[in-house]
Amino acid sequence: MEYGSAVRSASAAVDEDLYTRGPDGGLVTQSTAASAIAEALERSDVRPGMRVLEIGTGSGFSGALLSELVGAAGEVVSVEVMADLGARAADLHRAQGRNNVVTVVGDGLLGAPGHGRFDRVVAWARPELLPEAWVAQAVPGAVLVLPVDVTERAKTGMMLRARVDGDGTPQGEAFFEGGYVELHSEVLDQWWVPPRGVDALVRHEGAAWWLSAGWASGDRAAAERVLRKLAVEGARTPLLAEDEGPRGIAPYLYATRAEELCTVGAEGLGWGIGYADRQGAAVFTPGAGEVLHAGDGSALLRLRQWVADWREAGRPGHPDLVPVLSRVEGGRRVRARL
């Protein structure tokens, strides 16, 4: 993506390693890739003098970039659930003279109570819904850029750009690619198993394997059998071309196969989307066009058909999807349609 002069200037003014590297040179917990941050900030259109609510302080690098974008006349309020990360970022901002950043330790789902309203809301952790608290703290015309779940299945999220209209209602404008950890009200000590959406969990050779599927919560025993088959008997079959990949087809499946879709993950192996039933499963492996599958073969056939349908539709991706927001308790549910 091409970045405008404001984002380029902000990036040049901030020492990334200072924020994202610890004393031993290793990456700080919850550090987001600079390119992903830059894309989100470009889409946020942050301008001098604005007030920005940041959800997920992390290393503090994104907050420093926001500090540069809003300038001395603006303000950034950054919310972090992990007290040590929040304190570290606040110390770095202070040492760098970035006095327009206020760090708050708390539950990001609640926004920043007592800190007024904002022109922009930017989040680096994925909520289940677009939280009502964020919308309530956004002024009319505010832009919100955040990762959000777009199906009921675990790990199925996209980045959303929305705008708050004159009566305070958020309207979805566009989706784009981006993967972030789940936003959670408590500090978590592991991320191999998602904190929400998992319907079955087994261990194989010490590693956790999990499954998220619409039918699985009502038949956990069958779901566990499928997981064990995948862990023990799983075979790999190429299914996507080199220029396609799982991330290419994922938006299409989120929009058109949300009820049938499953996600499967394994400790140390990552996670993938696909199809599962009581006879077997077939899921794309991370970063490749291969499918991991086991069972009677019906799941693999189903996935082959989905790939064929996607190709016939012209291989639609994130820019082709329309965000659909509906009000529910606690916020707005976000779904995608073609």
Image: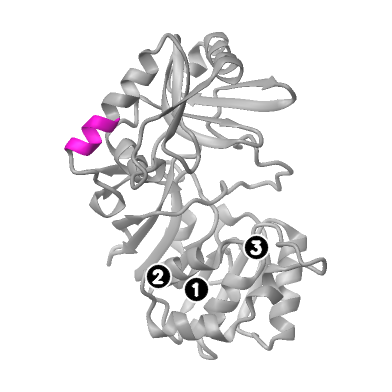
Mark 3 vs 1, N-terminal side: 1
> What range of the chain is rendered magenta?
307-312
Residue type at tag 2: Ser
Mark 2 vs 1, N-terminal side: 2
Mark 2–mark 3 contact, CB under 8 Å? no
Whether residue 20 is in magenta: the answer is: no
What residue did someone put label 3 on? 58
Mark 2–mark 1 contact, CB under 8 Å? yes
Q: What label does residue 44 carry, if any? A: 2
Distance in Å between CA atoms under marks 2 and 1: 10 Å
Query: In the picture, which quadrant includes the N terminus?
Result: bottom left
Distance in Å between CA atoms under marks 2 and 3: 19 Å
Residue 302 pos. (x, y %) = 32, 20
Q: Between residue 36 and residue 220, name the one nearer to us.
A: 36
What residue did someone put label 1 on? 52
Depth-wise, is mark 3 or mark 1 nearer the camera? 3
Residue 103 visible in the current orientation:
yes
